[in-house]
Amino acid sequence: MIRAVFAAATMTLLLAACGDKPGDAPATGSMTKEEVKAAVDKVQLKPGQWEGRFTVQDIDLSNMPGAPAGMKEQMKSMMSQTSLKYCVTPEEAANPSGEMFSGQENKDCTYQGFAVSGGSVKGQVSCKADGGTMTATMSGTYGGEAYAMDMDMKMAGGPNGAAMAMKARSEGKWIGPTCTTAE
């Protein structure tokens, strides 16, 4: 629902492996999941029909052993969405979920520098899974009727030393008060 507002595909791609382990203390300079939620809760959205787009701008697979020729373009095409319509309920608009950046439970993520104020949002999340680390730095703008988020994601320490990087953009706009398409 509300996760689609900032990055429908982004969070799915990036944070599927992220979250907090109960009892883990945040690393020095990092933020707790609750601090991230408090920052994100400042976002106020207009309820109704929204339209969003996720575009992969660049993928670097140069450190992916065995990546077949043409995989980069295939991945860019496959992960980019031309348009996605979804509904934001009045309840979701009034109370956005901090989980859109903080990931799922029972995993190993840290958060740094999340700030939401004056129409700007920024932050970094780093998650460990399967021996590797995925780090995403996000910055963008938001308002009640539109958002735009640029993301710089890097994965290191994958199988056989695999690493990759991806730059992407998520954008959305409010298109009306009446929902015609469910999420």
Image (tube, rainbow, N blue to C red):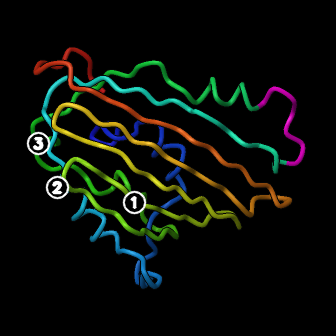
Which x, y percent locates residue 146?
24, 32
Q: Is residue 88 magenta?
A: no
Which x, y percent locates residue 85?
32, 21
Q: Quadrant of the C terminus?
A: top left
Q: Earlier in the sequence, mark 1 or mark 2?
A: 2
Q: CA distance from mark 1 to mark 3?
A: 25 Å
Residue 42, label in figure = 2
Closer to the camera in the image, 36 or 115: 115
Residue visible at 46% across and 74% down in the picture: 21
Task: Describe residue 168's horizontal placement relative to residue 73 as left or right.
Answer: left
Above or below, comparing residue 80 to residue 14 in the picture: above
Task: Describe residue 70's horizontal placement relative to residue 136 as left or right.
Answer: right
> Which quarter of the picture shows residue 135?
bottom right
Residue visible at 15% across and 34% down in the picture: 89
The amino acid type found where label 3 is placed reads Glu
Task: Give SS at disc 2.
Answer: loop
Q: How many marks?
A: 3
Residue 91, label in figure = 3
Q: Could you classify mark 1 by the number of other residues whose Cα lies within 10 Å: few (under 14), some (14-19), or many (20 or more)?
A: some
Look at mark 1 in the image and give the residue it sits on. 123
Q: CA distance from mark 2 to mark 3?
A: 14 Å
The amino acid type found where label 2 is placed reads Lys
Q: What predominant SS class does the magenta segment belong to? A: loop
Which x, y percent locates residue 27?
47, 82
Residue placed furthest toward the right: 66
Above or below, comparing residue 138 to residue 87 in the picture: below
Above or below, comparing residue 105 to residue 148 in the picture: below
Q: Which residues are magenta?
A: 65-71
Q: Earlier in the sequence, mark 1 or mark 3?
A: 3
Q: Could you classify mark 2 by the number of other residues whose Cα lies within 10 Å: few (under 14), some (14-19), or many (20 or more)?
A: some
